[in-house]
Structures are given as C-alpha cells and as structure tokens.
Image (spheres, rainbow, N blue to C red):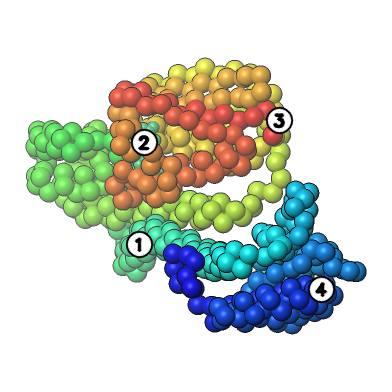
Amino acid sequence: MNTGNKPIDFKKNSILIIDDNPMNLRILVDYLERYDFKIMVAHNGKKGLERAKLALPELILLDVLMPELDGFETCRQLKENDNTANIPVIFMTALESLEDKIKGFEVGGVDYITKPIQHAEVVARINTHLRMQDLTASLNSKVEELTQTRHELIQSEKMAALGKLIAGIAHEINTPLGAIRSSVGNLSEFLNQTLMQLPIFFKQLSEKHQQDFFVLLQKSSKIDLTLSIKEKRNLKKALIGELEQYGIPNAEMIVLSLIGIGVYKDIRPFLSLLKNPNCQTILDHAYQLSSLRRSVQTITIASDRATKVVFALKSFARFDSSGKKVQANIIDGIETVLTLYHNQLKPGILVKKNIAELPLLWCYPDDLNQVWINLIHNALQAMDYKGTLSIDVLLHQTHISVSIADSGNGISLEIQERIFEPFFTTKVAGEGSGLGLDIVKRIIEKHNGKIEFESIKGKTTFTVFLPLNS
Ligand SMILES: Nc1ncnc2c1ncn2[C@@H]1O[C@H](COP(=O)(O)OP(=O)(O)OP(=O)(O)O)[C@@H](O)[C@H]1O
Ligand SMILES: [Mg+2]
C-alpha cells in the first residue's frame, strides 16, 4: 500500500503501541502487521516508557486514557528524555474533547486519531509522520553538512587572506631589507678601501682646499629631491657653461661628478678646488663620502619603513604596547608632526591652520601622532609637495574633529572603496606600502572614533572624529 507520493520502506519502520485495552491492541497489531511494520506493544504507560527507551521505535501510538500513568504524562516523560524526545507520538483518543486534543499537542504529540480507529486512517497518519521524520532527519544532516562546509569555507577564506597578508608583509619587509643590505655593502666597501687613503689624501690638500672640501660635502647633504628630470637637465647644461666660462678643463666630466655628489648649482665657493689639477681625485673622494651619507640616509628610511610594517602587524594582531590611555593635548601632537615635516613643507606648501582650543583628551598620543603623520604625508604626496595643506581642528559638544585637506588631484571614484585596505596603494614601490590608512583606521577605532573623507579634483579632505569622553 502506498499512501504518499513516494513509496516508503515499511521494513525499517518500527512502531510501539501503548494501550491498556488488550482488545484494541490485538486488532491494531493484526492490521498494522499486514503492512510490514515492526510492532512492539506495552500495556501501560510505565512499560511503554521502558520499551521506548530500550527499543527506540520510530513512532509511538499512545492511548490517552490509561490507569496510573495516563497518555499525557507518558508523553511528557518521553519528551523529557533525550533519547526518546524526538520519537513522534500519535495519541489515540476516544474523546472528542477539543481540550484533550490541545493538551496532546502541548505535551509534545504530533497528531491524534480518534477511537473507534479507522484503520486506513491510522496507516495514512503513520506514513505521513514517518515520512516527516525521515525528511527532518535528512534535513538535519544537510544542515549539519552545510554548517561544516561553511565552517571549512570560512577557514579556507581566512587562510587565503592570511596567505595574502603574509605575502604582502614579506614583500614589504624585503624591500627595505634589500635597501639596507646594499647600503651596508657600500659602507663596508668604503671602510675597506677608502678609509685608509683618506689621511694621505687630506695631507695633499692645502688648508683652504680642505675647508672647501667640507663645504662641498655639506652641500651634498642637502640634495633637492624635488627637482624634475627636465630641471636637472637644464641645471647640468648651465653648470657646464659656467665651468667653461671659468676656463676649467674637462668641464663635462667634472659636472658629472658634481651631479653624482648632488651639487647642481652655486659652485662659486669651490672654484679654486675645481681648478686644482687633482680635481677629479678630490671629487671622487667627495663622491665616496657623500654616498656614505646617502647610504646612512637610505638605512634610516628603510628601517623606518620596516618599523611601520611591524607597527601595522602589531595592531593587526591587536597587541597593545602602549598600555594605558593618558590625558594629552591633541594639538601638540599635530604641531609636532608639522614640525617634523617642516623641511618638506617649506618650499612649495602653503599651510592654513584653523585650530580651536581643546580640552585634554584621554587617548594614546603616540598612536594619534601616527594618524596625523599618515594623513599629512598622504596629503603632501597627493599634491606632489606643491599646493595648500589645510588643517582644521574643531571642538563640538561630544567630540572633536580634525580635518586635513590637500589641493591635490583627489581620489578617483573607482578606488575610493579600497583606500583603507591594507596594502592597497597607487604609489610606486618604495613610495607607498598601502598600510598608512589601514593603520590610521585601526588607531581611530581604538579610540572609538571614526574617519571620513571627501574628495574631488583639487580638494581632498580626511576628517577624524574623536569622542571627548572615551
Ligand atoms: N590625500 C589623498 N589624496 C589622494 N589620494 C589619496 C590620499 N590619501 C590616500 N590616497 C590614496 O589611498 C591610497 C592608500 O593610502 P595609504 O596611506 O593607505 O597608503 P600609501 O600612502 O599608498 O602607502 P603608505 O602610507 O603605506 O606609505 C594611496 O595609495 C592613494 O592612492
Ligand atoms: Mg600613506
């Protein structure tokens, strides 16, 4: 007999019938056995509970009216036990009372059939509930499977993200390490080869030339990094012309050496040095010494970069080296950063400040300095060190806001969503690692603040909001 859409494998279905009326039991068992159900019986509630726990049938037919433990109480106890709680219970009741039916559902029954029992109805209801039980079981196992798969997916996503992050970090640390390695190479080559010759070299120079030599070195330390290729080419031409005017032979070779040292103009003070017959040797030594200085500069910049990556990593791993918050003046931090950047600001940047008086703020001041450094640095890079940098600090009722605006080209719409991602950068290697804004965001979140930006061509403003009582 097939009462549903799908044939059911009756063989596997075991049913426990609990009824105190032997007559009823007999008829029902006879009938159901024809359908190949595996039937077990119990004559009262207590026995029924015992059998259910032992045999774990797939369904229970339960009489309501029984002496001692009635059907409702038996059902309640079945539902209390973890092993039997999920076995569907169908009540058999002679009562037509609505209350009893409701009570049957309340204690955990899934259905009821009324006596006198219509056999076809019993089979239909049994089949329905067995099928539902089957479906529930397979649904549960699907849910479990899905949960597991989801867990695995999240895990592999995490691993992929971690892999990406580590690759990025490896690259970011490798670049400055490479710079440090080659600079250290320069330094040790100098120490091995040139250092020994220096005393002899200086002895050969007159006192005046020795002084000139040091002035030349001084100049080399002030290389103007902002010169364009075209500007350099023009300066070189002018320099050759100037040397030729003074009648200095080999003007072209000498200019090449001067440029190597970083001297593009104002050579008047060294004219007598340049007229020295040993001029080329002198310039070679100056070149070696100035490259020594450059190597040291490179090492400083490179180790700063590596430090920055490590700082980002630490904040990524939520290490907190700075410990407790302290009360500090935010403006002092901003002014300090502006002082640090003084040299890069002076030639081409107009700084406009509008700074309100602020109360002291509970914060991590060193971390906040990182915020100002990164935002100001980004602003300067965005304007190529030429334009207007505006800094506005305002006091509101519940928070302060610090806006840093530049007159650069702006952030194109396509990348606006990505700029806070770690390692997202539009700058060439060495100029940007893409960690700046990620660090900024983490620090601000640590202060329960937020950061927003607006950008159009010619004006980009980053605004940091910090709560007054965090
Ligand atoms: N003021 C700005 N104007 C225009 N673009 C900006 C500005 N600030 C950030 N950006 C864009 O956002 C990107 C990410 O900035 P972020 O500070 O995170 O990294 P970065 O400056 O490239 O490198 P790093 O800060 O690590 O040296 C930048 O590469 C740049 O494209
Ligand atoms: Mg940056």
34 versus 319 height, above or below: below
C-alpha separation, residue under disc 4 versus residue under disc 1: 89 Å
Mark whose residue sits in front, 2 or 4: 4
Q: Name the residue beneath numbered marker 2.
A: 416
Q: Find the residue positioned furthest to the right.
A: 68
Q: Name the residue beneath numbered marker 4.
A: 20
Residue shown at 90% from the left, 69% from the top: 68
138 versus 176 height, above or below: below
Residue 46 in the figure: left or right of residue 347: right
Instruction: First in sequence, mark 2 or 4: give its number.
Output: 4
Mark 4: which secondary structure? Answer: loop
Find out whether the residues at labels 2 and 4 contact each other: C-beta distance under 8 Å: no
105 versus 220 height, above or below: below
Instruction: First in sequence, mark 3 or 2: give its number.
Output: 2
Disc number for residue 178:
1
Mark whose residue sits in front, 4 or 1: 4
Residue shown at 29% from the left, 47% from the top: 428
Q: Name the residue beneath numbered marker 3.
A: 469
C-alpha separation, residue under disc 3 versus residue under disc 2: 31 Å
Q: Amino acid at mark 3?
A: Asn
